Amino acid sequence: MTLNTRRRTSSSCAVLLVVLFFAVNTYTPDTQRGSSEADLLFTSEAARPVFETLRTKRKLKPESTTSYQSEPTPDLHETFRIRREHLLEQCRRLNITRKFTSEHWLWSMLLEFPGPLDVCLPPKVGSTSWRDLHKRVSERGALSDLHPASAILVRHPLSRLTSAYRDKYLDGAPISDYDKNWRKSQGFNSPRYFYWYNYWLPTLISSGRLAPSKEFLKRVRDARSIPGTSSLGIAKLRDAVMDTYGSEDLKTQFSNATFTFREFLEFILWVDELGMRDLHWGTYTEQCLPCQEDYQYILHLETVDAESRVLLQDVGYPEDIRLATKHRTKGLSHSLSTNDLEYYKDLPKALVNKIIKFYEYDFELFGYNKDILTV
């Protein structure tokens, strides 16, 4: 069932859904698309809705939408066609359509615009700008002569990791720097405890600075046996950390701790070995299910300015509806920028190879260069 069909069905079932919602969830905060990262990780998993997805493939192809735009851009439509054909070819070659079937992540990544335009937006891929655009479009009211489309936004996987490090680990600054002034200057709104329990304290354990207790290891083992633990991120790891290391003394003891980029990458691999992943660095292949869903437009963050304009024109939005990019990486779409490359140049080769293996399918499906030594 496509998202279009789902919308029509949901309209006819609205009354039933409202009754069920209030009967079951009156005591539980609702989680919706567009929720903050703290909401996504701290909301009760039992309260999360199960959304249908783009299961029925749309037949619309990017090149067929050229007539919808006032100023055709054949080169970009050709780019979209090549990317989509490459994706389909790699999905067939790698035979991974049935390898990733969980939709726990997909529903939270999809942003539905009028039209409808459905965009899968993984974290750390410029999703904030798209959510701002969604708000502006929604405030415009009814729009006519719109054409359906679906899109996915990606960026170089290794560039995505440097962005996550700058965000979650303060680019190596002491964690004591994360105060009101820091949040204001960086535009962050997550509370300090969110970072402490989801990232800093677990990384202290993975780096060996804090010995894992028997109780912690037991809780992690128990969490691994719960279906869907991996696709729901590291919420179970956070719960184990909070229950085992909830002492305020640790916050004082490690108030000036810092984390290197190497420790961050090692933490990613450590968490993966525990059978858990965080939504901020989970793979596109798992989060947006590109081999199962039909995305006519594959946008690269590195060149999103021009590509988003073509997409929005094809849908039929007015000229003044444009993406206001806020976090756009510098460089080419198939290589890392010089700034991003600096993070990797002195790392052990074995560690870099493990990270590249972690994102193996993302590299193959979206055509990014994984040989960073040639950049």
Image (cartoon, rainbow, N blue to C red):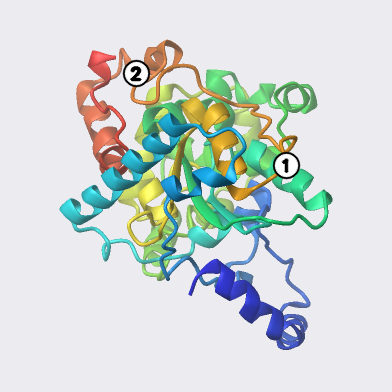
Q: Nearer the viewer, residue 77 or 350?
A: 77
> Disc number at residue 344?
2
Answer few, some or many: residues within 10 Å of disc 1's Cα (few below 14, many 20 plus, some between 14 and 19): some
Residue 268 lies left or right of residue 141; in this view the side is left
**Residue 36 appears at what percent x and percent y?**
68, 48
Q: Nearer the viewer, mark 2 or mark 1?
A: 1
Q: In the image, what residue occupies the spot 64% across and 28% down?
A: 325
What's under tag 1, amino acid-wise? Pro
Q: CA distance from mark 2 to mark 1?
A: 42 Å
Determine the secondary structure under disc 1.
loop
Reading the image, the residue beneath label 1 is 318
Q: Please state which of residues 200 and 330 is positioned toward the viewer in this rendering.
A: 330
Residue 255 place in picture, x, y as percent: 63, 27
**Viewport quadrant of the C terminus:** top left
Where in the figure is residue 9, as x and y percent of width and height? 62, 81
Q: Quick one: 201 or 306, which is closer to the camera?
A: 306
Residue 199 badge? none
* Coordinates of residue 116 in the picture (x, y in percent): 62, 59
Q: With 9 as the anchor, is 75 left or right in this view?
A: left
